[in-house]
Amino acid sequence: MSQNIVIITGAIFGMLAVLLGAFGAHALKKMLSEDQLKSFETGVKYQMYHAIALLSIGFNIHYTSTAMYWCFTLGIVLFSFSIYGLVISAAKGKKLRFLGPITPIGGLLFIVGWLLLAVHTVS
């Protein structure tokens, strides 16, 4: 896995987290319920946490693996972006229910990514 790819991926996801956080706080605040806004913010927080994790492993490339990179990257896409889709679609009255089961798969990928980081660091 290229160090540049890991860093660029982390930077893009970090930038998107800031953009989506601002979008949620300003543009969506009027159309979302308090619970929906909290769910959206959870997606943003987990995206930012894992963007920072990608940056950390990118700048310390000897602590990473391809599997770890993909767990964090796909975890963001499946976890955070499914939450965004669920919240926005529900606010528009057409909840995309098929996204519900995708969210925990993303969460599982986050867990595996962190486990891989621990195992890779010890070995």
Image (tube, rainbow, N blue to C red):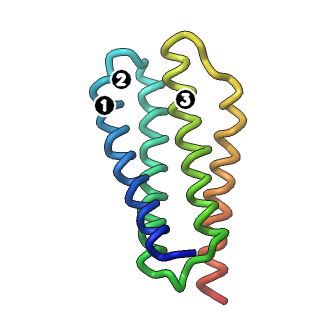
The residue that label 3 is drawn on is: 85
Instruction: Give the amino acid type for the residue marked by disc 3 in the picture.
Output: Gly
Q: Quadrant of the N terminus?
A: bottom right
The residue that label 1 is drawn on is: 25
Name the secondary structure under disc 2. Answer: loop
Mark 3 or 1 closer to N-term? Answer: 1
Name the secondary structure under disc 3. Answer: helix
Mark 3 or 2 closer to N-term? Answer: 2
Instruction: Give the amino acid type for the residue marked by disc 1 in the picture.
Output: Ala
Q: CA distance from mark 3 to mark 1?
A: 16 Å
Relative image position of residue 95 (x, y in whole percent): 61, 18
Relative image position of residue 14 (x, y in whole percent): 38, 54
- Is disc 2 in contact with disc 1, using a CB cutoff of under 8 Å? yes
**In the image, is residue 83 above or below residue 9?**
above
* Label total for image: 3
Relative image position of residue 66 (x, y in whole percent): 63, 72
Report whether 80 appears left or right of 31: right
The residue that label 2 is drawn on is: 28
Q: Quadrant of the C terminus?
A: bottom right
Relative image position of residue 100 (x, y in whole percent): 67, 31
- Residue extending farthest top: 93
Q: Badge 2 local density, few (<14 within 10 Å), some, or many (20+)?
A: some
